[in-house]
Amino acid sequence: MQAIVHTTAIANLKPQLQVLAFFAISMLLADARAQDVPDAGQPAVLESVSVNLKRDGSIRPYRQMNEVLSMLQRYGQGLFRLEFRLEAKDPKLPLPRALKLAVMHADAYVPIPIQADGTLELPVLPKEQAKDAEIASNLPKGSAKVSGKLLLTVKPAQLDMALVRKIMNAAGTMRSEILPWYLRWAFPQVEGVRICSAQANWELEWPDTATVGQLLTVPLSADPKDFDPDQSGASKQSPSARRQCTTLSGEERWPDNARLVAPLDASLSVRLSGQR
């Protein structure tokens, strides 16, 4: 039995203000024929899909996205991860439950699991497969959008100035030395590690080398113009309702072993150039 799957283009992927302003990926319109899943008694095989893609100059090839994902995997030192989110363009028209998303290339296709909240992770393909790979779905044309966010894997309790400097060096090296110039739009400059919590109650502490057993501490000040990118609607809320934030750039004069002391609800994120 054969079924027709209509794949569509999700064009001009636009990241949110507080997330990575990059990855404008487009979903391509396609017609696909898929084999039914075999009975339990038969050997399991992947669905076979043939696609006629319609392309235009606005479509960014998956190979460019794959280059960024590969770079992060190889040189990110385990400090970063990329998270994508699939959302309806029109909030009044929710996405269908039975939606399908896949990365397709000449040899096969890779299904992309979508979590209940719409988050997903795109696969890193071998370079040869990524050359002709495309993203496809069974969504109506123009009904969805995908946003990408660069996340830190580090927890507040792990953060000290040495780790801040490591994060900044890794991000700077990837953007300026490893990523090709034509893809730097996809990896904006990181200005620092942002720390946010409901109350501005953060400090750094480190051992006093002059007095055994004593600690030196320095309080960190909140930036009144910054806000937590993970707080929904933060820019529209009153200052008293917004989570407070401060940023460490790694250029501070405090020693590497100065560690963060923060409230239990503290969270970390990357602060990008021009992001407020």
Image (spheres, helix red, strand yellow):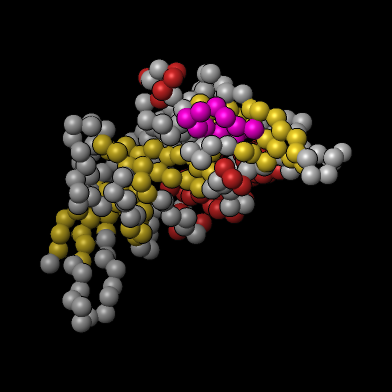
- Residue 105 in the image: state x and y as whole percent: 38, 57
Query: Main SS of the magenta segment?
Result: strand
250 relative to 43, above or below: above
- Residue 253 in the image: state x and y as whole percent: 77, 31
Direction from residue 69 to residue 203 in the image, left or right: right
Direction from residue 139 to residue 248 in the image, left or right: right
Residue placed at 36% from the left, 26% from the top? 233
Q: Which region is colored magenta?
A: 188-203
115 relative to 186, above or below: below
User: Looking at the image, can residue 270 be seen?
Assistant: no
Q: Quadrant of residue 166?
A: top right
The quarter of the image holding the N terminus is bottom left
Direction from residue 16 to residue 6 in the image, left or right: left
Q: Quadrant of residue 104?
A: bottom left
Query: Is residue 185 in the magenta section?
Result: no
Residue placed at 29% from the left, 68% from the top? 46
237 relative to 62, above or below: above
